[in-house]
């Protein structure tokens, strides 16, 4: 009987052979899926371990956006594609300006669909990319499973030189630290089910980090009320229907009452919501929201305090 060769230790844990899956090619379909799923179960716990560091990144990004600056994502391969996806989805989900979150991917648009040879190996390309768009006061989040992708490292170092606050999401606790990172977020996902296939656990971890990071940032900026998306504007019939459903959920009022409030608010869901919950006119609701930097709860508290 032959035995699998000894697991070779390489520099990054994500590249090492996983002792739990050395016989995965002998397994049934059901067992293959069970083995992959078992490995995937490690990811949420690994992300939980870095919540303090992730919180520091959220606060830094929130401060940058409040001050009129931007958030940049920098990545390559799977990391870069996930970053592009996260940035793109924030515009329709939270009605943010399309330049608030900017994604930089090694190899450009072509690399989103096909691999571009050596795109991630040039630190100077990453530095040149951010030099054209990153400003003093921006926040730059780099993503690399290995923790040492030259394109990402070069971009972060240049961003730091330009006066940005920087953070790095890595899945390699053994990666050397380097100047240029203010917040290091190391998610220890361990060896992949298939050695080196970082689109698996490492990619899942980065997706969890990104969605938590951007969602928490949106919440801090007042783009939600409770757990409802309230920053959208009713610019078409589909969105009007969605905003009325959100208004009904938040207020308990009828479709007619919510529709009338939305009309008075000129399609602005937040204004309609403050109107209904605080029982004020749309002009007063708009002023309260403006004074509260768009936070519905703060606007409601202010209106109610003035009324008492």
Image (spheres, helix red, strand yellow):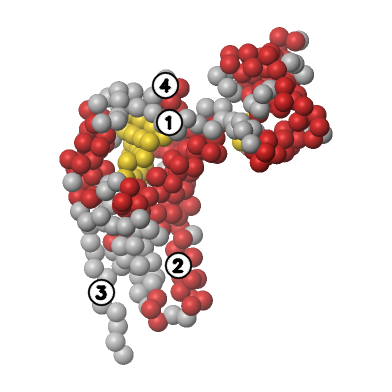
Dot 3: element: loop
Q: Which mark is residue 36?
A: 2
Q: Are marks 2 and 1 in contact (CB under 8 Å)?
A: no
Q: Nearer the viewer, mark 3 or mark 2?
A: 2
Residue 164, image x and y in percent?
30, 27
Provide residue 179's location: percent of width, then percent of height.
22, 35
Secondary structure beneath label 4: loop
Q: CA distance from mark 4 to mark 1?
A: 9 Å
Q: Which comes before the other along the chain, label 2 or label 4?
A: 2
- On screen, residue 110 above or below 308: below
In the rendered image, is residue 246 in sight? no
Neighbor class of circle 4 (other Cα within 10 Å; few <14, some 14-19, many 20+) is: few
Q: Nearer the viewer, mark 2 or mark 4?
A: 4
Image side of residue 110 versus residue 299, left or right = left
- Determine whether the residue tagged by mark 2 lies in a helix, strand or loop: helix
In the image, residue 281 sits, relative to residue 13, either above or below, namely: above
Residue positioned 46% across, 70% down in the render? 35
Q: Quadrant of the N terminus?
A: bottom left
Q: Residue at 72%, 22% (x, y): give it.
A: 264
The answer to which quarter of the image holds residue 268 is top right
Q: Which residue is mark 4?
A: 68
Measured in 3D between alpha carbons, the distance from the residue under mark 2 to the one under mark 4, in whole angstroms, is: 43 Å
Label 3 sits on residue: 6
* Label 2: how many Cα within 10 Å (few below 14, some 14–19, many 20+): some
Q: Identify the image quadrant of residue 168.
A: top left
Instruction: Using the image, determine if residue 112 lies above or below residue 297.
Output: below
Q: Which residue is mark 1?
A: 100
For marks 4 and 3, give the CA distance: 54 Å
* Residue 263 makes an appearance in the image: yes
């Amino acid at each position: 009987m032959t035995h699998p060769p000894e697991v070779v230790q390489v520099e990054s844990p994500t590249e090492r052979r996983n002792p739990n899956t050395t016989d995965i090619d002998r397994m049934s379909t059901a067992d293959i899926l069970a083995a992959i799923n078992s490995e995937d179960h490690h990811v949420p716990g690994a992300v939980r371990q870095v919540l303090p560091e992730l919180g520091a990144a959220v606060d830094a990004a929130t401060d940058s956006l409040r001050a009129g600056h931007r958030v940049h994502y920098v990545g390559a391969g799977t990391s870069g594609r996930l970053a592009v996806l996260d940035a793109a989805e924030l515009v329709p989900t939270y009605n943010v300006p399309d330049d608030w979150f900017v994604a930089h991917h090694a190899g450009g648009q072509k690399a989103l669909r096909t691999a571009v040879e050596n795109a991630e190996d040039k630190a100077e390309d990453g530095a040149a990319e951010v030099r054209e768009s990153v400003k003093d006061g921006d926040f730059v989040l780099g993503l690399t499973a290995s923790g040492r992708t030259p394109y990402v490292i070069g971009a972060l170092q240049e961003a730091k030189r330009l006066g940005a606050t920087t953070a790095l999401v890595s899945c390699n606790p053994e990666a050397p630290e380097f100047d240029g990172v203010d917040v290091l977020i190391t998610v220890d996902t361990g060896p992949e089910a298939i050695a080196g296939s970082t689109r698996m656990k490492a990619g899942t971890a980065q997706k969890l980090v990104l969605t938590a990071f951007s969602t928490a940032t949106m919440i801090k900026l007042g783009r939600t009320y409770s757990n409802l998306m309230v920053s959208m504007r009713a610019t078409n019939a589909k969105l009007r229907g969605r905003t009325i459903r959100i208004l009904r959920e938040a207020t308990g009022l009828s479709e007619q009452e919510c529709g009338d409030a939305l009309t008075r608010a000129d399609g602005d869901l937040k204004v309609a919501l403050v109107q209904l919950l605080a029982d004020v006119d749309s002009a007063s609701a708009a002023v309260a929201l403006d004074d509260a930097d768009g936070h519905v709860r703060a606007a409601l508290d202010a209106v109610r305090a003035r009324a008492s």
